[in-house]
Amino acid sequence: MLRKEEILSRTNNGLLVFKHYLPGDWRIGRHFLNPLYQDKKASCNIYFDRHSGMYKMKDFGNDNYSGDCFFFVGQLKGLDCNRAADFVEILEIIDRDLGLGLASGTPVSMSPATVRRAVPDKTEETPERHVKPYQFREQKFPLAELVYWQQYGITPELLEHYKVCSLREYNSETAEGKPYTYTSSVAEPMYGYKGKQYIKLYRPFSTPRFLYGGSFGENYCFGLEQLPAKGDTLFITGGEKDVLSLVAHGFNAICFNSETVTIPPTLVYRLTFRFKHIILLFDMDKTGKESSRKQEKLLEEFGVKRLLLPLPGTKEEKDISDYFKAGNTREDFLKLFIEFLDNLYSDTLIMLKSCEIDFNNPPTKAQEIISAGDVPLGTQGNLFGITGGEGTGKSNYVAAIVAGCICPAGAEVDTLGVQITTNGRHKAVLLYDTEQSEVQLFKNVSNLLARAKQPDKPDELKAFCLTGMSRKERLNAIVQSMDKFYYQYGGIQLVVIDGIADLVKSANDEAESVAVIDELYRLAGIYNTCILCVLHFVPNGLKLRGHLGSELQRKAATILSIEKDEEPAQSVVKSLKVRDGSPLDVPLMLFAWDKKAGMHVYKGEKPREEKEKRKERELVNVARDIFGRQTHITYIDLCEQLQQVLDVKERTAKSYIRFMREREIIIKDPVNQSYFMIGLI
């Protein structure tokens, strides 16, 4: 099979292909008429491209006809070198017409003399426009010219910022070296877009409309210098006036020398770090629409899209400047852009629509399933976490909650200090245990049935021992069984997962932890139930340990910690988090084993003094942690850090600051009263 590299190696990197097919006496780096279309002005040349290591043709008049030797032959023969089959045919044509003999297996060496003559001088390597000498005289913008710009919303200040001037006179010379002069008049005003080494003339009512003086370099980009460091949207337009018109209406914009030039991918790549959206906003005539389609395809990897204006594409109504001139406002254009985003994100927005809060049809208030006093702990659609060390009575505490969900209506059941909403509709109550043996789980369920005053297991209670399953299988089993029981029992009252750490390989794996908590939170919302997660960790003050603990604390509506009391026979239930209010204001509930009753029983609340001591002790630890990292801190920073460390709302954090000041855990800095410092603790 013919290879592109073989042809390049035998044709002096493609130069001999151009020499074979291009008529006339042309030279490298010198302009000639492009034979691919009816070119009226010599602005096309052959040059050596150092990046690709081959000769290419550059057409400054129409960039659609710029490319390498394969592109050129394809254009001559009506073939598309971007199509594999056509490209192979192009290779065969070159091999045959130049007599290379590659396809027949008998390659012919090209004449060394021809190759030597084809080597370009170093001065001919880069295709540059002829650098025209130029002189111009500026003038203050006449009133009539300011009115011209104002119809597009463009102010004098904006013209100055973008280095646009009004010209009285412009002098330069043609490509043949013949001098000429243009003079401004009322009927034919003349403007200049000034650069350091060039000027681009704009003559809106004259022919030619655009003239160039000086050296533009390779990548002329108007408006690039004035862009902000960061922004949401950047429009790439077809011309300088369009850039100015967009900026005048509060949008970021740039343009290149014309709509047909190839936009540099490297520049677009750099701009993607600064702007969320990069949008092509070209003219609505045939050339503009074709060019924007082509550029969108070339820049697809950078997420560049194109926006089409609702204009007919006539000479008077084709670009964004015409759009604003017609009386359309910034708000009108924003509506167009929002419609564009609607189409761009249609699938996502359709899905998101069902998630939008409808204030004309408010959702049903989440039912409280578990509460303590006036504080809701477990509600529908939320996670509820219970944590603590080994032997603190977590499983018995959870069993009491389950008993409250399955007890007969009107029965008085000891639920160890919490109130449980009656499960009048006999919705499913699911208990998944990942740690205890089948024998131990049977014993625990038998005890909770006795607590619930149920002689037999109600049908809605389902208890599963998952110790024989792999960790991956456990979560899958929970997901699928919840779905089945939800429909079988007309809903799910409560789900208990005793040992959620056994659903992941490691409780310190951040990705796994986030995934499993997200999935449980999703299930709680889908099935409108409360999922109670038991985490066998010893908390560090008001924080849970490990990534799994942190993620549970972030997503759960409530976290309770069960610890051994100073009285070893008793366990104390402390709140680490409640969604509404302060966890340090929730009562400290006690329970202990009662031999006579044959179960754990509620022992009441700890005295208020104990609750205040706990609050002070926890806040002292938090203060030491915060001031261990910095010695002085402002009120606002301290409030923000308390919200972050303790996962509480602003009003709760402010109440903690007030409490810490009252107990002199923190004090004002005597030197600077704007700062707090740690007290004598």
Image (cartoon, rainbow, N blue to C red):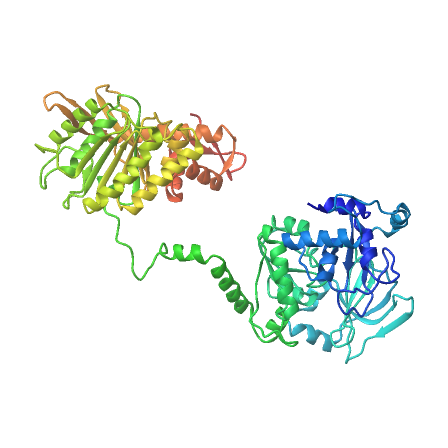
Q: Specify whether 620 is left or right of 270.
A: left
Total label count? 0
Relative to residue 329, is residue 5 depicted above or below? above
Q: Determine the image quadrant of residue 617.
A: top left
Residue closest to the eye, 164 or 507: 507
Residue extending furthest toward the bottom: 187
* Residue 406, x across and y down, in percent: 15, 38
Q: Specify whether 16 is left or right of 93.
A: right
Q: Is residue 585 visible?
A: no
Relative to residue 299, is residue 470 depicted above or below? above
Residue closest to the eye, 275 or 371: 275
Residue closest to the eye, 589 or 131: 131
Q: Residue at x 44, y 26 (%)?
A: 680
Q: Specify whether 159 is left or right of 323.
A: right
Q: What quarter of the picture does the C terminus occupy? A: top left
* Residue 408, x across and y down, in percent: 10, 39
* Residue 269, x across and y down, in percent: 64, 49
* Residue 612, x across and y down, in percent: 30, 31
Q: Residue at x 28, y 40 (%)?
A: 480
Q: Is residue 31 visible?
A: yes
Relative to residue 282, is residue 144 depicted above or below? below
Q: What quarter of the picture does the N terminus occupy? A: top right
